[in-house]
Image: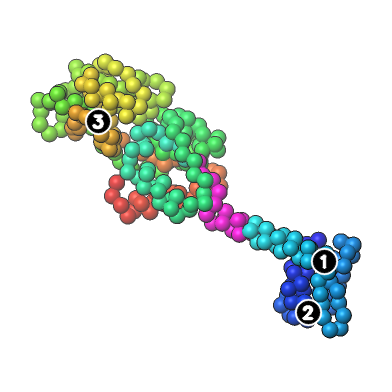
Amino acid sequence: MELRHFRYFVAVAEELHFSRAAHKLSISQPPLSKHIQDIERRLGVSLLLRNRRRVELTDAGKLFLAEARAVLAQADHALDTGRRIALGEIGKLHIAFTATAAYTPLFPKSVLAFRQALPGVNLSLTYMTTEAILAGVSRGEVDLGLIRPSALIPLPDGVKAIPVVRDRLMLALHENRPMKVTGAVPLASLAQAPFILRPRGRGSSFYEQVYELCALAGFTPRLVQEANEGPTILSLVATDMGMSILPASLQAIQAPGVIWRKLSTRTGTLDSRVYLVHHASRPPTAQHARFIETVKFLLATEPH
């Protein structure tokens, strides 16, 4: 049986009149009568009692009417679900982000706007390192990623990066460590300063840029304490154990006693860029495309 057979029967059962049902279905009466007979023959039971004056449902017909309506309702639901999937209104989206990228104002605004616009989408947010995000995007396990890549880490083949935030690098230090200079602090003047940073190596993509800048300024940071994440580093700076170089967006974290100073250097850039990465060669889902549209809209309408 096809869906049209269920529609034919429901129309006759609701009208209890073959001519009116045929008109409602935009077909002629003889084919409609034949379809109803075919349904009864297939089921092996009479669904309708017919005579020249009226049409009635049998007990079997009443039960079958409830089931036919349920089938048609489920079919309509399936079609509506398919349309909503195509429009990106339902489905799933997996976004991964690095710790420092999550503190940029764009990240929560984009997620909030996307969830408000598409509440039916199952949005999965996962913290990962830059290397893990790039590997996940490359393998198709992550739809989109927000990263702060180092120049030393090339993008895998097929992965496209969209620059979304330019974040200034700043010096975070305890208020008990006043700088002798006013205004921006020369990076080269920090050669002997105690630093709290993530150790070099795998998983330290953003911090590789810090090490590169210090090398260009003529020194290697003197580490007095190692820590892996920006919030942890800030909490250690608050103990006056040392200072650190972090993105300005981390000023959103309230660390008692920590002050922020601008940095200056003759070489290199003191900007940290946040990128939205995705796999360029795989057809994007509607949800994927809608999130990118949301980010681009916020970039065009709000300062970041």
Residue carrying label 2: 17
State the CA–CA distance, disc 2 to disc 1: 18 Å
* Label 2 SS: loop
Instruction: Kindly identify the amino acid type of the residue bearing the numbered disc 1.
Output: Asp
Residue at (54, 36) in percent of width and height: 141
Q: Can residue 219 be seen by looking at this rendering?
A: no
Residue carrying label 3: 255
Tag in front: 2 or 1: 1
* Label 1 SS: helix
Question: Is 287 on the left or on the right of 36, as rendered?
Answer: left
Q: Is residue 237 above or below residue 282?
A: above
Instruction: Kindly identify the amino acid type of the residue bearing the numbered disc 3.
Output: Ala
Residue carrying label 1: 59
Q: Can residue 253 be seen by looking at this rendering?
A: yes
Q: Quadrant where the N terminus lies?
A: bottom right
Instruction: Kindly identify the amino acid type of the residue bearing the numbered disc 2.
Output: His
Q: Is residue 63 above or below residue 291?
A: below
| Mark 3 or mark 2: whose residue is earlier in sequence | 2
The percent position of residue 234, horizontal first and vertical second, equals 27, 27
Residue 201 circle label: none
State the CA–CA distance, disc 3 to disc 2: 78 Å
> Residue 183 sits in which quadrant?
top left
162 part of magenta stretch: no
* Label 3 SS: loop
Tag in front: 3 or 2: 2
The percent position of residue 14, horizontal first and vertical second, equals 73, 73
Viewer-closest of 112 and 200? 112
The percent position of residue 84, horizontal first and vertical second, equals 56, 56
| Mark 1 or mark 3: whose residue is earlier in sequence | 1
The stretch in magenta equals 79-94
